[in-house]
């Protein structure tokens, strides 16, 4: 599990159809082979480490549900290590299980609070509610507007400065993870 509080921006060094090699510093500090790292919000297993990079394999499921297959060398990525029992919970519970890929519809507004509007597949948008949680490329955000076709979030300057969101523009794909509680509630509701 993760919090959606990005620890650092990494840089893709190598990208192939089934593997990424990412340069990082902070998240490598106590990471070992087999550990989970969130890359743009997707929980991935570290399969190889060097002093400056880590490698992760990409399964067909990961490629089908995320935008990671479109990454190329030089692209920045949001990175977060998995929670530990002593981690502060600064964001919300993020599993790293991306629910789908949305598209940036617009990103603008006053510098103190830019508004990011995202078009989302109906199967994802149905779980998003105003003032609820959503993770966009692994960033924990609060929904300011929910629509049948997407949602909007406010992005403060700190978040903008420390995540890949600062590079996003209209038309860009983004990974979306909805709050897991909404999916459980739906599953437990009586049918009919």
Image: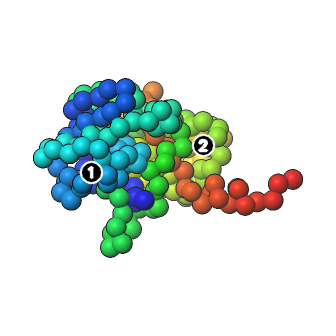
**The image quarter in which residue 26 lies:** bottom left
Q: Secondary structure at mark 2?
A: helix
Q: Nearer the viewer, residue 107 or 68?
A: 68
* Disc nearer the start of the sequence (2/1): 1
Against 85, residue 23 (above or below) is: above
State the image coordinates of residue 104 (x, y, percent, origin top left): 47, 34
**Residue at the location (34% across, 67% down)?**
84
Residue 124 circle label: 2
Relative placement, left or right, of 128 versus 174 is right
**Residue at the location (70% across, 56% down)?**
186
Q: Nearer the viewer, residue 119 or 75?
A: 75
**The image quarter in which residue 72 lies:** top left
**Residue at the location (35% across, 53% down)?**
36
The residue wearing badge 1 is 33
- Disc number lying in front (2 or 1): 1
Q: Nearer the viewer, residue 144 or 94?
A: 94
Q: Is residue 113 visible?
A: no
**Residue at the location (39% across, 36% down)?**
58
């Amino acid at each position: 599990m993760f919090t959606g509080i990005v620890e650092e921006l990494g840089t893709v060094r190598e990208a192939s159809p089934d593997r990424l090699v990412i340069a990082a510093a902070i998240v490598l500090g106590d990471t070992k082979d087999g550990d989970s790292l969130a890359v743009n919000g997707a929980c991935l297993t570290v399969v190889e480490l060097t002093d400056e990079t880590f490698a992760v394999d990409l399964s067909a499921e990961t490629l089908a549900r995320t935008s990671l297959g479109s990454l190329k060398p030089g692209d920045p990525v949001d990175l977060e290590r998995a929670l530990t029992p002593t981690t502060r919970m600064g964001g919300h519970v993020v599993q790293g299980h991306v629910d789908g890929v949305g598209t940036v519809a617009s990103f603008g507004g006053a510098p103190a609070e830019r508004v990011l509007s995202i078009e989302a597949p109906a199967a994802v948008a149905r779980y998003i509610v105003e003032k609820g949680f959503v993770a966009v490329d692994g960033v924990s955000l609060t929904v300011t507007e929910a629509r049948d076709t997407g949602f909007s979030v406010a992005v403060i300057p700190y978040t903008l400065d420390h995540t890949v969101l600062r590079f996003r523009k209209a038309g860009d794909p983004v990974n979306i993870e909805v709050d897991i509680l909404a999916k459980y509630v739906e599953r437990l509701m009586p049918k009919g």
